[in-house]
Amino acid sequence: MSTFFVENFGCRATQADGAALERRLLAEGFAAAEASRDAAVVVLNSCTVTAAADRDVRAAIRRIHRENPACRILVTGCYAQRAPQELAALPGVRWVVGNSHKHQVAEIVGRERRDFVPLEGLAAAPHIAVGDIFAHTELLAAPVFDAPIRSEKTRPNLKVQDGCNNRCSFCIIPAVRGASRSLPLAEALAEVRTLVQAGYRELVLSGINLGRWGRELRPRRRFAELVRAIVEETDLQRLRLSSVEPMDWTDELIALLAGSPRIAQHAHAPLQSGSDRVLRRMHRKYRPWHYAQRLHKIRAAMPWAAIGADVMVGFPGESDELFEESRAFIASLPFTYLHVFTYSSRPGTPSAAMPDQVPVRAARERNRILRELAAEKNLAFRRALVGRELEAITLGAQHGDATEALTDNYLKLLIEGRHEANRWVRARVEDVSGEGLVGRVT
């Protein structure tokens, strides 16, 4: 009961939660193991956004129990909040701890270590700690920068917001993450300064609904205030924003990105569908023309920025005609990449009970079509960059005699030679690779 291993599933916010769990377990006196097979306690920080995410967690439980039957498995996160009994029934699971009690994980495991009971003496039923997530006001997060295992060595992410007040008809996340809540400005700035002091040059700001940061704080604040404060009141060299909802890409936020060389030229705005009828059924709060207006403003302000979106296919009621409407809308916009998902029915969401569910084969075909469209757009964007100079941060991974880096506008770049991680380089783009760029330091 002295070693632990944390495995994260899902989004950047979950990764930040995992970093906080690692930090608290270390403070409780546990030591980090290199792999799950070497750990006495394995913490699975779960996702439940799709049925596939659930399957991944269950498969991990089975694998870990098979490879390391003596370890005690603790499942926490979104899946644990949604279906604790389902997880508790799986062999090897000792604890199921929902998001409502995630901040107590280290204490729960530490308590059992102090009162150690051999495996054969364990109670048959796993311990379950799940409560009302909407009564939960703590924001469990830590920047991923000092954990000894699986930390992001070059580009840590800092979660400054959790929960969501939207009620999209397909989404289970508000039910398992709770209401929107924010890290206070002073605390966020303190975390950024800690990262800077630790030597990090680029930071990714993350959240479940990041653009809603500050709305429930008193006094009420806006997301652009946080971005501006990080730039003006810290020495961070580069700030990158993760996903921000379309209605939160305000003129002020766009101007901040366009006007500061210390903010990455990168905008991600979830779309979900380009069909007005489908968006209404999804209970999304914007119409296609609103979305297009925002994207064209972003492109006009930042001609070489990365612009991406999440897109869903196969939502109930999405006919061939409505899918084509969505595809044509996406084709008309200046995207440089897309994350394409197939609709997954989530128990308890309004869409799960909707009529006109789309056949799996049709949804898969639509997914393929949009992925091909995304690949075409991405290739055209990369080809347009050949001959230009870009700034990038080295990631440390070596590919033969080349080093992997990430450009300001979110493209993988292979640069000639071996370069230490976490260093800025300026490189001239000489060619495109299978999924990125090839360049030479200037």
Image (spheres, helix red, strand yellow):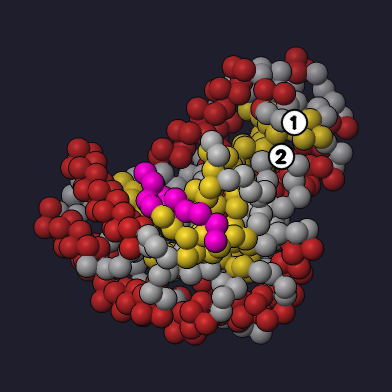
Occupied quadrant, residue 333: bottom left
Q: What element carries label 2?
A: loop
Q: Position of residue 112 (x, y in %)?
A: 81, 32
Q: Compared with residue 282, is residue 146 higher up or lower down, i.e. above or below? A: above
For the residue pair 282 and 31, the one nearer the viewer reads as: 31
Residue ID for mark 2: 149
Residue ID for mark 1: 33
Residue, x 34% and y 67% (percent of image)? Answer: 284
Q: Where is residue 204 in the image (x, y as percent from the top left)?
A: 59, 61
Q: Which residue lies furthest to the front in this view?
A: 442
- Mark 1 is surrounded, within 10 Å at the Cα level, by few (under 14), some (14 to 19) or many (20 or more) other residues, namely some
**Residue 346 in sight from this viewpoint:** no
**Amino acid at the residue labelled 1:** Ala
Q: Compared with residue 193, is residue 367 higher up or lower down, i.e. above or below? A: above
Residue 89 magenta-drawn?
no
For the residue pair 424 and 128, the one nearer the viewer reads as: 424
Spatial CA distance of label 2 from label 1 is 8 Å
On screen, residue 268 versus residue 367, left or right, reads right
Which of the labelled discs sits on residue 376, or is there none? Answer: none
Q: Residue furthest top?
A: 120
For the residue pair 244 and 231, the one nearer the viewer reads as: 231
Q: Compared with residue 209, is residue 371 higher up or lower down, i.e. above or below? A: above
Q: Position of residue 65 (x, y in %)?
A: 61, 20
On screen, residue 85 versus residue 354, left or right, reads right
Residue, x 46% and y 40% (percent of image)? Answer: 53
The residue segment tinted magenta is 431-442
Q: Which of marks 2 and 1 is nearer the N terminus?
A: 1
**Amino acid at the residue labelled 2:** Ile
On screen, residue 125 versus residue 435, left or right, reads right
Q: Position of residue 135 (x, y in %)?
A: 63, 61
Residue, x 80% and y 18% (percent of image)? Answer: 118
